[in-house]
Amino acid sequence: MKTKLLQGKYNVKAKITIKASKHEVWEILKDFNNVYTWAPGVKESYGLNNKYQEVGAGRHCKLEGFGEIDEYIQQWDEGSGFVYDVTPLGPLTNVYSSWYLSSVNKSMTTLKVTLSYDIRFGLFGKIMHKLIMRKKLNEALPQTLESVKKRVETGEMIRPLLEQPA
């Protein structure tokens, strides 16, 4: 799905086919606040407000080796996908992430993810992006999709579901 939110100068894209129905994959993805249960790079995540599975819902994530970010849903298409924005991180700004599902058949689903962003901090940010960030993003995104696939196909969580802070 195209969205006007994905207008960053830079993009990282990945896709994966999962041996499960679109509904089964959606059941994992729609649990927005608990991404830490399957995403290896997210040590901790929790909701930031009383909204859930809708535009405006927010989560806080502590990232392995990256710091902490807040993410807010900007577009929610029930059963198909969503787009969320991400607070600035390192040289990245105006960051949006799009997660969308499409059925291949009754038991196969494709997940397509796009990360769109701009660079801040002028020349320093561009150098940091070229030397470090771009490579990390190009490695991390496919690994994250492999984790979704594993979570859906095996039911295995990499971290147990914890009670969320009030």
Image (tube, rainbow, N blue to C red):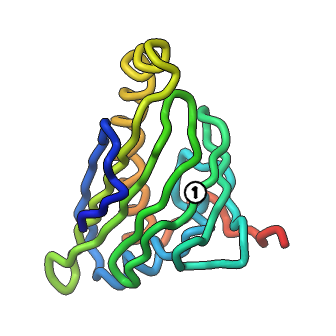
Residue 131 on image: x %, y %: 40, 16
Look at the numbered disc 1 and give the secondary structure of its residue.
strand
Left-right relation of 139 to 55: left
Q: Is residue 46 above or below residue 126?
A: below
Identified by mark 1, the residue type is: Glu
Relative to 122, does residue 45 appear above or below in the rendering? Answer: below
Can you give x and y, in whole percent of width and height, for residue 89 in the image?
Answer: 57, 36
Quadrant of the image containing the C terminus: bottom right
Residue at the left extreme of this rendering: 105
**x, y (%) of residue 71?**
58, 57
Label 1: which residue? 71
148 and 90: which one is in front? 90
Residue for point 15% across, 82% down: 105
Marker count (numbered): 1
Q: Which residue appears at 41% of the width and 69% of the height?
A: 82
In the figure, is residue 106 to the left or right of 153?
left
Residue plotted at (37% across, 83% down): 79
**Looking at this view, is 78 or 148 the one in front?**
78
Q: Compared to 147, does 153 lie above or below?
A: below
Q: Residue at x 36, y 59 (%)?
A: 98
Classify mark 1: residues with Cα within 10 Å, few (<14), some (14-19) or many (20+): many
| Residue sitting nearer the eye, 166 or 161 | 166
Q: Quadrant of the N terminus?
A: bottom left
Quadrant in the picture for residue 34: bottom right
Q: Position of residue 72 (x, y in %)?
A: 57, 62
State the image quarter where residue 154 is shown: bottom left
